[in-house]
Amino acid sequence: MMSHDPCLREPRSLFATPSADPDGRSLSRAASQSLAERIFALMTGGGTSTVGIESRWRNNVRWARNDIATGGDTEQTTIELTRVIRGASGNASTNATADDALRACVGRAESLLMLGDESPDDYPDPLPTVHPHTEPTLWFGDTAAMRDMTLSAVADASITPAHTVQLWAAGYADAAANSRAVFNTQGLTRYYAYTTAQCSITVRDPHGHGSGWAGVDWNDWSRVQPERLAQIALEKCIRSRNPVAIEPGRYTAILEPQAVCDLVAPLVERALRRGDAESESGPFADPRRGGYSRIGQRVIDPRLTLSADPMDPECGIVPFNVNGEPYQAVKWIDQGVLRELWYDREYGLRQLGKDFALPNSEAFRLSSATRTNTIDEMIANTTRGILVTRFNNVDLLDFNSMLATGNTRDGIWLIEHGKIVKPVKNFRFTESPMFILNNVEMVGAPQRVFRPLAPAVVPALMVRDFSFTGVVDAV
Amino acid sequence: MRCDRGWLASIVLVFTLGMSASPAHAMDVASYKIAMADSITLSDPFARYVTPGQCKQAFYRLHRAYWRSRRRDTVVFAPLTDSTPKSVVQAARHCTTRFSVDRVDPRQLLDLVQLYIWTGQGDLAQRAMDRLRLASAKRPAVARGWTMYLYAMTLLSSRPVQLSSVQQAVADLDAMGAPAATWRLFAHNQLSKYLIALDDAAGAENEARAALRASRAMSLTDRIDWMPRIFNAYQSLLSPVERRHGGAAALTILDTALVDLLPLRPAGSAEAEAIRQDIRNERQLPLMLGSSIDTPLHASVWFSTSGDTIYPRHGVPALLIAGTASCGGGCYPMYATIRRLHAKYGAHLDIVFATGTGGFFRLQPTADPLIEADSAGAYWTTYLQLPVTVAVETTSFSRLDDGRRRDAETVNQRNYFRVREAVLVDGHGVVRWLGGVEPTSEAIWDHLIQELLTAQ
Amino acid sequence: MQRRHFLRRASLAAAAGFVPHRLFGEAKTLPGRATPAIVGRCDELYAPDLHALVLRAVDAARSAGASYADAHITWTRTQSPGWTEGERRAIGVRALVNGYWGFFASTVWSPDEAARLARGAVAQATAHGRGRTRAAELGPRATIANGEWIMPVKYDPFDIPVAEKLDVMNAFTDYASSYQVGIGTQADMAFLREQRISATSDDASWSQTTYQTQAGFSVTYRDEYHAHLGAGAAGADGLGLSGRGWEMISESGLIDMIPQLIADAEASRYRTVVDVGRYDMIFSADAMATILDRTLGAATELDRALGYEANAGGTSFLDEPLQRLGTPAIENPLITVTANRSVPHGLATVKWDNEGIMPDDFTIIQNGVLVDYQTTREQAAWLAPYYQRIGKPVRSHGCAGAESAMMIPMQHAPNLALEPGALETSFEELVASIDNGIAVLSLDMSMDQQGLNGLAMGTMREIKKGKLGRYVDNGAIVFRAPEFWKSVQALGGKHTFQWSAASRSKGEPSQRTSHSVGAVPARIKQVSLIDPQRKA
């Protein structure tokens, strides 16, 4: 007996023409649905189930010291199952789609929930409303069809120019076809297919005297432009060689978009929860009124808006989370004023009379309402300051102030009298995104940065009094 | 107990030797034997248990599991008087047979004592307790007192409770004098609460007063540290005093409490002000006791089998409860109490749920308060079939500038439910008791209603 | 249950004509250790079918033109009792063509898929070559045929019912909270079991099972009134992640530790703020393990040192290995750092690494002198000039690993150890040698991208006149790795040696593995203490 698992794909010829059909690389809607139905059919004991199904087929290449080092072509479907019977819940996950694996997964979830307490209240609540989600275009056929030859050429885009000037290029690029689906036994059906692509390049002096970096991620590989990244990384490496130590202290800092993202991302990831702010916790709790957030108050520079929108043409987001809750277009901070903080469905219901949650995708766009300045203009306007490419190992020190520490990396220069004068040794910093977003001199045009976790579109910022607290002589 | 797996033991799938001549399509992974066998065949689920403490945890777990699948909305389950289910007792006894009173590690003796008590093996419990006393003889009095306190609480939490044993244990604790004063405060207070639940007001009053006497034997440092527990003992005292002597006597108790507790916090401090505020709050109940509420319950929507919409009704004692239909499973114990009271008193007692609207019913927003009112009423009367009348007010509300809803106090909340969530009024609108309605206060409500009806 | 097993075998035998070779047979342990009693099996994996798959994969890779290939299958079970359960399957094939690597992986265990992955890996390696050839010397190969090793544990955690696990852990927390009034507890546990079936094109094949068990247990103490003191907390050492089974929790000496934990929790409420400045410090074994791992451990990963992690975690301050080897990495003859994958219960302990090599115990730093790096087969060749110069064989130290078969094998950290001092100095004696200083009991570290400068925070106590005092609030140490190690003045003796758990992410895509790090307490001269929240 050989039962056919509809989730297994036919083995493909390696030389088949790449297809833009989502069925080729990520799990299709039909296959996801069929898989969910197979899982639901294995349920025993009644109750409800929710299953999240994520698939990813990723092709990658990695290089270092001017040659390709490794690569990979991997595919995986991950299933997360939650069973609920009369209020008791159990959770289990697997990545195998064969019958026995699914049966084991359901069994484990059901065993777990047997240990929890049931609720005796079995009222037949009506099915929750399934709110529609937006439909951004996040699938790009060419990206899904990326193969080894293409990615190998990507490596060469930085290797060749680095080799020419006796520097070492290292980097990583990948392209992936993904799908996210959520189904439950109460009629929720969500499916979304999307591609992702990233490229990051580090060019180093072979004797460790300098290092430059550039990177970006997109849904569409054609926007990645590895040649451009390679050039930036190369130039930064050359210009960063033989840095000189200067005194730490407070400086005007011109933070490139990646550096801004490195500092602001923790704010987006950790500080936007409404429940915290209304419990006197975090930077958005009102210090003068316990139990109130700072919604309605100005919290950062009035030029700046912090927002997220799945339909954003440069910062599109898979439009629902792993629980199937749709992401909405939201302005967390609108021209400096805090407008929204994320909450779950119960909060939305009881406090705001809403039938839905406001979840946080952790993607964000930071933009300015007013005329923006280029980095060159910022430099020209700096009497004495520091230009930073990016930060490394940003660690939060204090949740209420969002004070964080870490160090600079891959290109840092001293600016004097409107000109870059020399590369300097890296600094440790002790600074908070709340502080820098309140000490903005100039804002750049937002651009997409490197943040595969969740997309970000961020401007360069020129900020006052940035706190560099030590010299870090690592390159 | 078998390996805790709810699912089928093993899936035997046919193995095929198709490796060399495989067809074009992939062979199903399921044809490989990934046998998810059920767990170890232990006839004894406690084979690896090495301490009585582990057996005790199994006891808790099995006890919860026993009740888990038995719905609590029956007239049977009443936590104070029911005994521990036989199957649970048997399993715990079986686990305990692995241990011997004489050989078990002294650090495990208290757990063993607890197990013996809860499984009705009093003699073994006594022997284990004797050995524990002996083993603790050289420990400082504070530590010995703590163990004795735990022992007394073990007796108090067994089902059924042997009150005389508890009282003996507490007396032994008292005999330890000042070094055990803190534990004596705790023990007498807990015993008082137990007696309150049995509606033994005289006993409860004695115990609460004993708790307060013990508190005066505590050192000043300990009194400062444990002030909230001393306050709690005053709270325990209030209930039987109100029960036996009425509101005025309770107010006197609160005057004493203020004098007693205020010096335990720095003068003028926020904590001292908090004590004042807490005592002011406590005064509300005795002030309301015995008062007369002239206004009937207010509502936009009524669910009334009698057809009346004036409640409380003249000549009929009424139990008025501020409820919320979104309470869910947490209110089932209250519903069980209500069913039992109704079963006993029938038409002689009105039970009325008074509720407001919150903008949602369970998990759904409700823009129209009348729809919400209908849903709430139907939930209690039609779905749960509770023998209650339901009065639903349309709650006024405002929105904070951040959008959060803030409900205004309703008429009924102001007139009836400012102090407690449930009010018992006699047939003449006089408040005879206030409190929460659950199985642990059921005896009080029951006796009071009986007294009211007898007096009529 | 036994009967069911028998039936299963019979039907299998009937269908296939042979008795399956069970992966979970008699436990094959490292030589010299007694075979432990394996109590039952909840989940079983029948090996030969999967063995056949990895063999098919390497065959297909060879046929397609690989000069070397290895294939792995992993089946990983995870559990956080009462919370969640997980299972992950993977099969991955790595191929070497003209000195370039390719790698394909998926979750489908079938012969056709094994072949597809193999051919894919070869084609990818070919594409990576872009028509070029480069040298890839792999050194001595693995020689095992049908090897089998199971990490010795007394109880496979996945055989123990979740209910029993909860009873055992709850009994600990109940004991603590009954010990004295005011005690709160926090406890959690997690289990992992990886079964791995592997083959190389060098005709090596083997299977290995490893376990990781972790428990956290801490007590908190809080007076009802003395709120200004805050809550104190103390966590149990020795229950952290290690290569053990369920017995790590069920047979732990936690009951014995609880009184001291409670005392520590009470004491830790009394906190003080210490002036910033330089202090002589005593680091606990656990703190030394953390610094060892994050400085010297990371720095001596050969791929990192040569720039292969430059685009990810960064590089190493011990770069240009061929120039540094044989010279002092640390100007301190007290410091000897060794590596192994053999210590019992080590998180990186295996019988064979991902390339089938039996790892050896080796020295990385000998009395301050850098004598070796962590290597795989390919990487050992990069140090060939050095090995030849000192007359050592050019062979891998067996550091190949991967988070699962879904990830490409690469060098991962072995177990690391800071060797004890020659004298039998105790932690207390080290503390007693300081008049005014700081004791650092545990650390969380933030290092720069070369592993050179660090900022670390953790549990610290004053040392006053040779005795431990109040807990230090909000202090952090800053250091530079070479100066830190140079400033080590004394080390604890053999009896103070203790193992801690560590993990590291490396590679792109990122993969994370765990390893054990052992160390002794140490006295360090004039370490800089700062207020980490003080801005410039």
Image: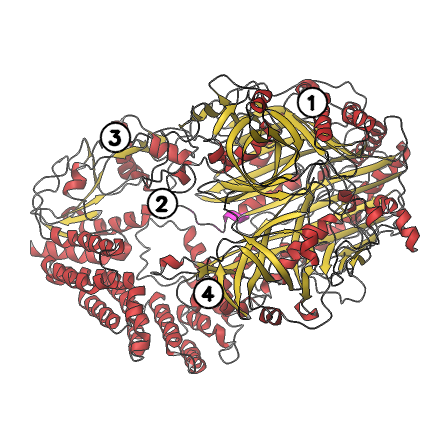
Residue C157 position within the rendered picture, expressed as x and y whole percent measured from the top left: 63, 56
Instruction: Give how far apart the Cα atoms at labels 3 and 2 are.
Output: 29 Å
* A433 left or right of C280 in image: left
Q: Residues within 10 Å of mark 3 (few under 14, many from 20)?
A: few
Instruction: Give how far apart the Cα atoms at labels 3 and 4 are.
Output: 49 Å
Position above or below: C144 against B55: above
Q: Earlier in the sequence, mark 3 or mark 2?
A: 2
Label 4 resides on the chain identified as C
Q: Which residue bears the numbered disc 4? A: C267
Question: In the image, are marks 3 and 4 on the same chain?
Answer: no
Disc 1 and disc 4 in contact, CB within 8 angstroms:
no
Position above or below: B287 against B234: above
Label annotation for residue B329: 2
Q: Quadrant of residue C113?
A: top right
* C74 left or right of B389 in image: right
Quadrant assignment for the N terminus of chain A: top right
Nearest the viewer among A444 and B439 is: A444
Amino acid type indicated by mark 2: Gly
